[in-house]
Amino acid sequence: MMRTCQSLPRFVTTSLAILTTAVTTASADPPRLQVSSNGRFLVQENGAPFFWLADTNLRLYKLTRPEIDSYLNNRQAKGFNVIQGPVLLHNSEDIDFTNPFGQTNTNPANPNEQWFQHIDYIVDAAKSRNMYIALIAAWGDGWDNFNTNGQARNFGRWVGQRYANDSNVIWIAAGEYSILGTQKQFTNRWKSLALGLQEGSGGQSLITAHGSFVPGSQSSSVAYHKASWLDFNMIQSGQTGHDGSGSDNWNLVGDDYRKRPAKPTVDGEANLERFNGWTAFDVRRRAYWAVFAGAFGHTYSANGVWSSYRGGGDDTETGPQDTWDQALKYPGGADMKHLRRLMESRPMLNRVPDGGLLVSGDGGGSSHVQATRDGSGRYGMVYVPGSNREITVDLGKISGGQVRAWWFDPRTGKSKSAGNSPSGGSRTFTTPGSGQDWVLVLDDASQNFPAPAIGGPLP
C-alpha cells in the first residue's frame, strides 16, 4: 500500500505534499468496525460481534521497530485486539515526545513526515496481526499546539485522510479532552479536531474522545454525547483508590448507558497495574464491573507499558518500577483474555446490565457485585469479588425449564459445574473457597452452550 498526502490542507508545506510513504500491508486487512444496530456494541462490517480488549501504550512511538513487533506479538498472544495509542500530537514540555530516530511532531501547521512514517509502521504492524489501533490525535495538554479551531480541523482532516484507507484505525480525537476544563474554548477545539478527522477519513473510521480524571467530566458523554461525529463514549475511571471518584466505574458506565441516543461505552482508562499498589485483582475487578454494567469491552493498562518506559534517564511519570518489556509480564494483563473469551462464548449483541438478577449479597464499594444477562434470558452472569461469599439470584430471569450453573475463574479461564436447577424462584450460591473473585454463569440448559470461555464469538 502507498500512503499519499492528497488534497492536503494549505498549511502543509510543498515539500511535505510531494512525499510518499511506502509500506507493506497484510494481504487481508481487518474488517472495519461499526456500531451495532442497537447502539450498544461494536461489530465488524460483516456483522460479527467485536469485543474490545485494548492495551494502553500512549507512547508506543518511543519503541524501535523490532521492539514494536515484540510488543505487538506479546499483546496479540494475550488476547488483546486493540492498542490504545500512540498519541500523535502532544505538549512536549513535560515528556519526551521523540521517536527512536530523534524525530518529533509538535507543529500541526507542518506535520513531520518522517515522524509519521514511524506511525505508519505501527499501524501496519498491527494490521498484519489483525489488530486495531486507536490513534490519539492529540492529548488534552496539547490544546495550545493549535493556534485556532480552524487549524485543529485542518490537522484532523490531514491525518484522517492519511489513514482513511487503513481499516484497523480508530480515532480518539483528544486524550483527557477536559484536562484544562470544559469551557467552550476547549471543547470547541476538540470538536473541530474531531470534525476534521471525520472529514479526512470520509466517515469510515470510528471516532471518540478520552474522558478526563476530573470528577464530573470522566466520560466523553459529558460534552459530546449527542455530537454527530462521536460514535462511542470513552470513560476514564482513573487512579483514585478504592473510594475516589470513578472507583465505582459501574456507575460511570451506567450513566452513559442511560443516555439517549444509545451509544456504546467503554472504560478507556481504569487503574494501572502496579501503580499505587494496584494488583491483578484490582484491574480484573474494574474490568468485570465495567463490562457487566454495559460496556462493550475494556481497556487494560500496565504501569511502564503505557509509557513505553525504557529505564535510565527515561521519563518516570507514574513512577514505573519496571521497564515496558518487564511490565508486559504482569499477571493482570494475562488475565484479560479470560474476560474476552468468556463474553465471546455467549451471545454478545443482546446483552444488558441487570441488577435485578441479584436478589441479595451485594456488599457495596470494593465488594460490589455486578450482574448482566442476555436480553432474552438465554444466560446470566454475576461477578463476585471474594471467596466463600453468598449471593442469591433470581432464576426467573433465565429462560427455559432448567438452569445450568457454572463457576468461572477469572484468573485461569477455567470453569466448573455449580449444578442444575429448575428455572423460576431464587437460589443461593456460595463462591468457591479459594481465589479473590469469581463469575457465576447461569445458562438456559436448552441452549446447550459450551463451558464458559469456550468457542465464539456468538452474535
Image (cartoon, rainbow, N blue to C red):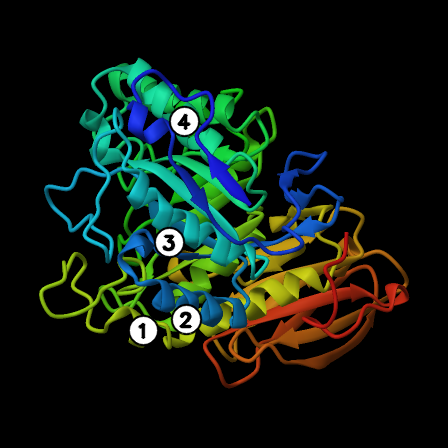
Given residues 325 and 229, the one toward you in this image is 325
- Disc 4 to disc 3, how far (Cα)? 31 Å
Q: Quadrant of residue 371?
A: bottom right
Q: Residue at x 59, y 58 (%)?
A: 130
Q: Which structural element holds mark 2?
A: helix
Residue 211 vertical position relative to residue 416 in the rendered view, above or below: above
Q: Position of residue 268 (x, y in %)?
A: 42, 47
Label 3 close to label 1 by CB (< 8 Å): no
Q: Earlier in the sequence, mark 2 or mark 1?
A: 2
Task: Decide: few, some or many residues near mark 4? Use Cα within 10 Å; few <14, some 14-19, many ≥20.
Answer: many
The picture places residue 69, in percent across and down from the top left corner, at: 43, 66
Disc 1 element: helix
Residue at point 37%, 68% (across, down): 66
Residue 70's disc number: 2
Q: Amino acid at mark 2?
A: Ser
Q: Sequence order check: which comes first, mark 2 or mark 4?
A: 2
Residue position marked by numbered label 3 in the rendering: 270
Circle 4 sits on which residue?
158
Between 88 and 363, the residue placed more toward the observer is 88
Q: Are marks 4 and 3 in contact (CB under 8 Å)?
A: no
Q: Label 3 to label 2, Cα distance in Å? A: 25 Å
